[in-house]
Image (cartoon, helix red, strand yellow):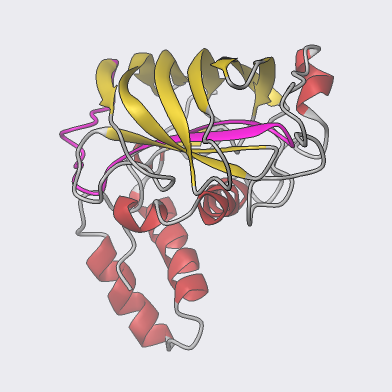
Amino acid sequence: MRRSTATLKLAAGPLLILFLVFGFASCGGSGDDDDTSPGDSSGNPGTATTPGSSGATAPGSGPVQQSGPGSCEVTFSGDLQLEAKTGGGPSSFGSDYYYDDDEMRKNLEQFAKIANSDASEDEIKRQVDEDMKSDPRLFLLIINCVQDPDFSISFLPGGGAKYADVPFKAGTYRIVEGGPFGADGESKDFGVLMTTGDDAFYGVSEPGELNITRFDDKGIAGTFTFTAKEVLADGDPKTVQVSGKFDYPCSAGKKCKK
């Protein structure tokens, strides 16, 4: 099984779980203080006005809370009205750039054991050796903005992106149209995985922009804007304009300077 950015975009729930797995592993299993509500740290919990927005979580993810250092502010307009500010923490973002080779091997080994539970130690080692030669090795960049149960937004480049396409520095990227699983598998542009509390999936319907103003050994910051339309809807699909900003300190990896 090939583990790449293209694989990570298969579903929103598994994506968030995967990120939490590696965030916890690299932080020694602590996960910081992610057992509290985002509203507890930000002081500004958002409340969706769409009927049925309470009591649901991003499918497959379970409650994913962002309550550590950092913040993400997001505004929804159109058929969903919502303003919210969440915290940061290990589940907020991650990238290969923060791990040295030893850490990366451990991350890849852990993932290989999850993905191939029946594999022998020799098979796991061969898989890790192969993945260490890949570009990217695991994931270029994942940025999450989550307020459970109201919404879950994840930004990540398409499966065709390499390290040269998303370098470790500030840059401006297109957010391209796509279905509920983000950009096309071979795209080098960014896609969005987005769900809302009424169990709705959204796909980008009009190209947007992800402007990363800082991406260095201390963290990441930037802004985003895009328009998304509900997919797989039972009735008339909702259209939502989404804009926001984020500022997250890095929290995992030996190359992270806290």
**Which residues are the magenta region?**
142-170
Residue 215 x/y as whole percent? 37, 20
The residue positioned farthest toward the front in the image shown: 235
User: From the viewer's perspective, is 97 left or right of 27?
Assistant: left
Question: Magenta stretch containing residue 165, yes or no?
Answer: yes
Depth check: give the residue in front, 82 or 32.
82
Depth check: give the residue in front, 221 or 108.
221
Residue 69's place in the image compared with 194, above or below, is above
Residue that appears at 62% across and 49% down: 24
Depth check: give the residue in front, 132 or 63.
63
Query: Considering the image in quadrants, where does the C terminus appear?
Result: top right
Query: Considering the image in quadrants, where does the N terminus appear?
Result: bottom left
User: From the viewer's perspective, is 164 left or right of 166?
Assistant: left
Question: Magenta stretch containing residue 3, yes or no?
Answer: no
Count of numbered marks: 0
Q: Is residue 7 visible?
A: yes
Quadrant hosting residue 32: top right
Residue that appears at 42% across and 13% down: 222
Residue 72 x/y as whole percent? 59, 18
Residue 151 x/y as whole percent? 64, 32
Residue 221 x/y as whole percent? 45, 15
User: From the viewer's perspective, is 47 left or right of 174?
Assistant: right
Q: Is residue 142 visible?
A: no
